[in-house]
Image (tube, helix red, strand yellow):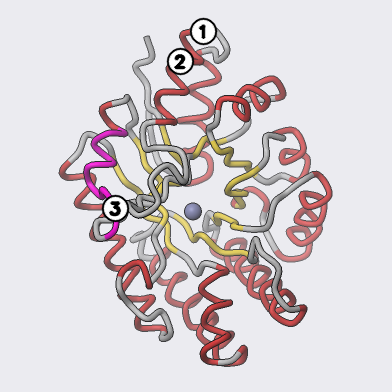
Amino acid sequence: MWRGHITDNHMHLDPINGLGVDAAKQFAKAGGTHIIMVGKTARDWGLDGLRTEDFIDSYQRTIDFAEKVSRETDAEAFPVVGFHPSEFIGMSSVLGIESACRIAQDVAEVLEGLYLERKIYGIGEVGRPHYAVSEELWERSNVIMEDFLSLSARIGCPLQLHTEHFDKGKYDELSGMIKRCGNPKKVIKHFSPPMPLTAERSGVYPSIVSSKDSILTSISESSRFLMETDYIDDSSRPGAVLGPKTVPKRTLDFLEKGIFTEDDVARIHEDLVEEIYGIEFH
Ligand SMILES: [Zn+2]
């Protein structure tokens, strides 16, 4: 019987379009204790997302909502907010690339301030789009991603990366980018394929979507990974992603079946979370 903690490293909770607090209650009821709550986009909060002020506003709403979740449920929520690559692409089509890049820089400053004030536990999602875009947008997205890697290294801030589908070659490329401008000890590859050893070679922490097969493959390699659902909390897209109970359920089931040892669970859900985010468990 596991008496420690269970962390979902990437969950979106949406009090407007989804279950909000109730999703966190489901997570807690299944045995979950810690939610790395990644902010939804400004648009999800009903804002245009075309001005720096919209981002500031959406960050505050995420921070306030994380407090509410911690107050009203048995789980604790840790806010992480960022500048989603699709927000940059959308903004570029409306305002033009130059204006969108300027807003990206302003937003990065805002995020730096929030992290230094300890209002957020990390920056994310940031990165580059998972769908095809023009060469120019791809290049600019890479520049923004590198800027965030540099910022993360400079202030020691955890960074959750959203990218296109990853494989070994992509991990090598990321490793090169980080050598130039980042600190791998603060970089988390959100939605990583199940290849913890490859991620470890680049220094990055993989956060693995908690389907049965992915976690089975991962644990056969190493216990150096985080678990996530990427729960999207959007009632108009039920079943689009894993549900809020998945991480605790999968973890407890694998522990019971002997696929995970207690040491594995402690590492995945406590030690690595403490190492990366500075969240204390002991
Ligand atoms: Zn996400």
Q: Residue at x 48, y 38 (%)?
A: 273
Q: Which residue has dot 2 on it?
A: 253
Q: Is 33 covered by the magenta stretch?
A: no
Element class at badge 2: helix
Q: CA distance from mark 3 to mark 2?
A: 27 Å
Element class at badge 3: loop
Who is closer to the viewer here, 185 or 43? 43
Q: Residues within 10 Å of mark 1 (few under 14, many from 20)?
A: few
Q: Say whether mark 3 is within 8 Å of ligand 1.
A: no
Mark found first going from the N terminus, 3 or 1: 3
Q: Which residue has dot 1 on it?
A: 257
* Majority secondary structure in the magenta region: helix
Element class at badge 1: loop
Mark found first going from the N terminus, 3 or 2: 3
Q: Residue at x 60, y 68 (%)?
A: 148
Q: Say whether mark 2 is within 8 Å of ligand 1.
A: no
Q: Report x, y in % for residue 102.
A: 55, 88
Residue 72 figure quarter: top left
Asked whether, in this view, residue 218 is left or right of residue 254, the answer is: right
Residue furthest to the left in view is 72
Q: Are marks 3 and 2 in contact (CB under 8 Å)?
A: no
Give the amino acid type for the residue marked by disc 1 in the picture. Lys
Per the rendered image, the range of residues in magenta is: 17-27
Give the amino acid type for the residue marked by disc 3 in the picture. Gly
Q: Report x, y in % for residue 274.
A: 47, 38
Q: Report x, y in % for residue 27.
A: 31, 34
* Numbered tag placed on residue 18 in the rendering: 3
Q: Residue at x 40, y 26 (%)?
A: 248
Q: CA distance from mark 1 to mark 2?
A: 6 Å
Asked whether, in this view, residue 183 is left or right of residue 264, the answer is: right
Q: Report x, y in % for residue 14.
A: 30, 55
